[in-house]
Amino acid sequence: MFPLKGVRVLDLSKILAGPLCTQYLGELGAEVIKIEPPEGGDDTRSWPPRKDGQGAVFLAVNRNKQSVAIDLKSPEGVEIVKKIAKSAQVVVESYGTGVAERLGIDYRSLREVNPSLVYCAISGYGRTGPMGQQPGYDLMGQAFSGIMSLTGEKDGGPIRSPFSPLDQTTGMHALVGVLAGLMNRQQTGEGKYMEVSLFETALAFLAYNAQSYWVKGVVPERFGSGHESLCPYQAFEAADGYVLLGVGNDNLWRKFCAVSGLQAIQDDPKFKTNPDRVAHFDETVRVVADVMKRQTVDAWVEILQRAGVPCAPINPLDKVLAHPQTTARHMVMDYQHPFLGAERAVAQPIWIEGRERKVLAPPPMLGQHTRSVLSQLGYAAAEIDHMAERGTVLLGPETA
């Protein structure tokens, strides 16, 4: 099932949020044309670690795309982009506020050549407001939004979430917005301008924390791996490592007490219900922590799973990538890259009945498709060569 077959996406984004959005659009069948600067291309191509000059981050979020390398500071380059936009249905852009306007590839400019475009602009803080001109990065967003005031241990400093959650989730919000825009276009024939930002993604992440603040009138504090509304619900040290214990309700508390030797305190007024345990949070954690140290991680996982109590070992990445559940769900895809050889990729986390999870097209080399896309637009071979000589475009390797 490729519901976006026939949809052309002009990808003017870089780094992580926009490229993830357009990669997923490609997974759903869209044709994605990624515009990159001739000198170096997308910044993440050079980020370490690299394989044969191609950055791991770039490889992770740029499948299913064609790379066209164009100098957008040249009038010829802008004209090429407008020709692509004329035949596209979607534009995804992540320039700093005002940059697309200066280049002449903003929504108003491209709408003149294609009024029915769905145009999604990605930024750090949104295009308006007192911070609309500020550049945005995932780490800055985690700090400014208050997320880092909640991450880390109670008596420690702020901790960065290391998997760029704001970038990646902003990309997913962009995907949702684009799909909604395409539905609106199908129903009305009209295009639509939309925005997503790292800042607004961060605030959306904090929705229930904000609601708790409005209810209690108390600014939330750090809880480490724990949860302010549930207890015991956090990582505990076992005899040989850490295990995550998830006692999410009172029935699970009774089950946990039955298999951990804590029957004596099961109905104690301080521990009987979840509100009781949250009210006596530190004492509950101390009691549970003491008993958890008596068994190994594997032993606890076996005991708790048999009792129906949610738990999990704190797995390192290599272990979870090789786990039978990962294999059973086909979340790691093996593929051959024409220039880099054998590669692996994490699949889009949507399983569609009757469709195999596989890489449709490997991440492109810089300018790999410049000639073929320009030829489709009607440029003659000699004209393309002349633009390459002038530096307007870069003709990348087409075959290994």
Image: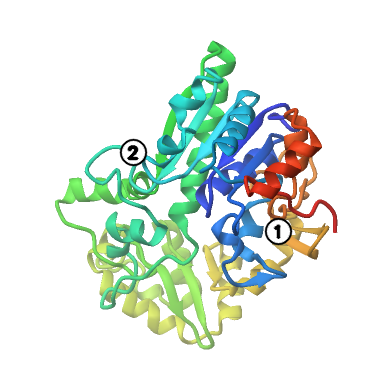
Is 160 or 284 nearer to us in this picture? 160
Which quadrant of the figure has residue 218? bottom left
x 71%, y 53%: residue: 363
| Residue 108 badge | none
Q: Is residue 353 shown to the viewer in this render? A: no
Q: Amino acid at mark 2?
A: Arg
User: Left or right: 194 with respect to 381?
Assistant: left
User: Left or right: 160 with respect to 241?
Assistant: left
Name the secondary structure under disc 1.
Answer: strand
User: Left or right: 284 with respect to 20?
Assistant: left
* Mark 2 Cα shell of 10 Å, populated few (<14), some (14-19), many (≥20): some
| Residue 345 badge | 1
Residue on which the image places disc 2:
127
Q: Position of residue 315 (x, y in %)?
A: 58, 73
Q: Amino acid at mark 1?
A: Ala
x 58%, y 50%: residue: 37
Tell us which disc is closer to us: 1 or 2.
2
